[in-house]
Image: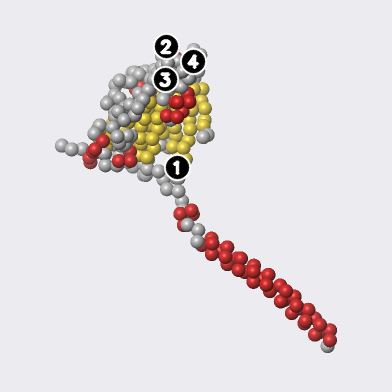
Amino acid sequence: MLLVKSQLIDKRKRFFFILPFGIAFLIACIDTFSRFLALPSTSLRKAEDPTYLTAAVWTVHFGYDNNARPSLDRVASVLADTIHYLLPSPEGELAPAILATIQTASKLIYIIIVHMGNDRDDLDRKLQEIKKIFIFYFSTNPLVFLGYITSEPFSRDYRRLTSVAKDIDPTDKDRWCQYILYKNLIHIGYARITHGSLTDTEIQMATFKIRTSEKFDDHSILVTDPSVVTEQSVLFNSKGHDYLNTHRFHMNTPKYFLAREHQTN
């Protein structure tokens, strides 16, 4: 009998000894769960898709400005994983091409950067075009091409490339080397900016709208009056063409492209 009572007393002692720790553990669990429920719901939401994409091409040949001073640091102030191609060149030109993939919330967008400066060897040009056309043609994702190609608009090289991708502005005939092409996107704006004495080439920029369905219409109405652009966020510079100190818009740009329903009679 005494043994049973002793065992009961020991169990009660252990119970009252463990009880505070159990209560503390329960309170800690409740507190942790309540803090979890209080977390902002936005931290758990899926990232939203961006609506627009802006890309630019600026070829820097020498890294020195017009006064023979190094300019790469200033070039960088104005301005991933990649796949690198060395385009075919039997005549020996090093013609690199870089394919980068941009991940949005629900889409992959390809960016192709190319330098093709050999305008003397015809075989080089043909083989390099074939390689780029192959990449363009088999790309099912939206694609932006930022290229330095020493060809005039509507030349043989130009016609071949634009047979599988669209020119950002087919009406711009005063170009020689830099081109922006695209595929499976909606072009919204196009601008050309002077080099500001930093190098020998201008900056070209383009803004695209990322399509939300497989069926879409590209914008076909070209305007230069920013006041008729309803989406103000796509304007390159709301303060005017000559606002920049050392760089300025030129060649009758910025240009904007509107949907067909915006056309006025």
User: Image point 37% across, 40% down: which residue?
Assistant: 52
Q: N-terminal of the two: label 1 or label 3?
A: 1
Helix, strand or loop at disc 2? loop
**Nearest the eye: 95 or 127:** 95
Quote the CA–CA distance across marks 1 and 4: 35 Å
What residue is shown with label 1? 104
Q: Nearer the viewer, mark 1 or mark 4?
A: 1
What residue is shown with label 2? 120
How many residues crowd around disc 3 within 10 Å: few (fewer than 14), some, or many (20 or more)?
many
User: Image point 33% across, 20% down: which residue?
Assistant: 175
Q: Amino acid at mark 2?
A: Arg
x%, y% of residue 193? 34, 26
User: Image point 83% across, 88% down: which residue?
Assistant: 1
Q: Nearer the viewer, mark 3 or mark 4?
A: 3
Q: N-terminal of the two: label 4 or label 2?
A: 4
**Nearest the eye: 242 or 171:** 242
Q: Quadrant of residue 115?
A: top left
Q: N-terminal of the two: label 3 or label 4?
A: 4
Q: N-terminal of the two: label 2 or label 3?
A: 2
x%, y% of residue 47? 45, 48
